[in-house]
Image (spheres, rainbow, N blue to C red):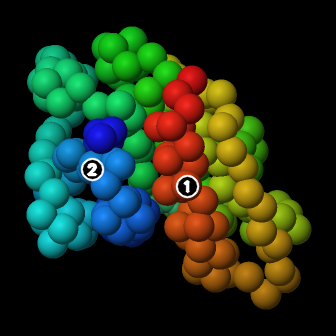
Amino acid sequence: MRDIVIFVSGSGSNMQRIVEYFRGRGQVCVAKVFCNRPDALALKRAEQFGIPTAVFGKDALYRSDAVLCALQSLSPDLIVLAGFLWKIPENIIHAFPGKIVNIHPALLPRYGGKGMYGEHVHRAVLAHGDTESGITIHYVNENYDEGDIIFQAKCCVDREDTPDTLAKKIHALEYEHFPAVIEKLLIIPK
Ligand code: GAR
């Protein structure tokens, strides 16, 4: 059995999709969901699946080893960022080399970096008149959205797309590919 933990900040629909994908397959267990917002819908979703949750603030992540120690005690095979909007600090990156992955709702290296998340990304893609967008799954390093790319998938951006309709297309790609990419990483680690 491989254990993963998932970091979330908001809705948690990717987290739910990952949980559903692995439920019943008996190979991968979502051991815990870590969340930086006590009011996040993701926490309710995790609780509905009976997955333990941990809510933490900036002190626990950046000014102490609290989150690091919690992770070390779980010793996960993979740490998955699924809509997690804070930067992962160096102490955690160094403790889990090649074991932290993120999903980004655009084709990196375009539209990455601080402040580039969710709707902001889709607005930027539309403002630039791009005819395609997509998703990027990548390893996490010290800089926002700059780690080695593992996987990308594309979708068309149509003239009539809005941030909402583009977000739906991107989420569909994420649901289709993210769990399968995680599964592959766990079977053939870096
Ligand atoms: C996803 O589209 C994910 O790619 C994006 O946040 C959304 C979370 O949705 N992540 C980022 O923008 C990170 N920079 P969800 O909470 O419903 O899974």
Q: Position of residue 54 (x, y in %)?
A: 13, 45
* Residue situated in front as seen by the camera: 106 or 69: 69
In the orientation shown, which residue stands out farthest toward the bottom? 160
Q: Label 2 vs label 1: CA separation?
A: 14 Å
The yes-or-no answer for disc 2 within 8 Å of ligand 1 is: no
* Residue situated in front as seen by the camera: 95 or 167: 95
Q: Earlier in the sequence, mark 2 or mark 1?
A: 2
Q: Position of residue 106 (x, y in %)?
A: 68, 54
Q: Quadrant of residue 95?
A: top left
Q: Position of residue 13 (x, y in %)?
A: 39, 69
Side of 65 relative to 181 (left or right): left
* Residue 117 visible somewhere in the drawing: no
Q: Is residue 80 above or below residue 8?
A: above
Mark 1 Cα shell of 10 Å, populated few (<14), some (14-19), many (≥20): some
* Residue 92 visible somewhere in the drawing: yes
Amino acid type of the residue tagged 1 in the rendering: Ala
Q: Which image quarter is the N terminus in?
A: top left
Amino acid type of the residue tagged 2 in the rendering: Val
Q: Is mark 2 in CB contact (under 8 Å) with mark 1?
A: no
What residue is drawn where x is 52% and y is 28%? 189
What residue is drawn where x is 50% and y is 47%? 183
Side of 166 relative to 130 (left or right): left
Q: Is residue 124 above or below residue 56?
A: below
Classify mark 2: helix, strand or loop: strand
List the residue tagged with mark 2: 30
What residue is drawn where x is 27% and y is 49%? 29
List the residue tagged with mark 1: 180
Classify mark 1: helix, strand or loop: helix
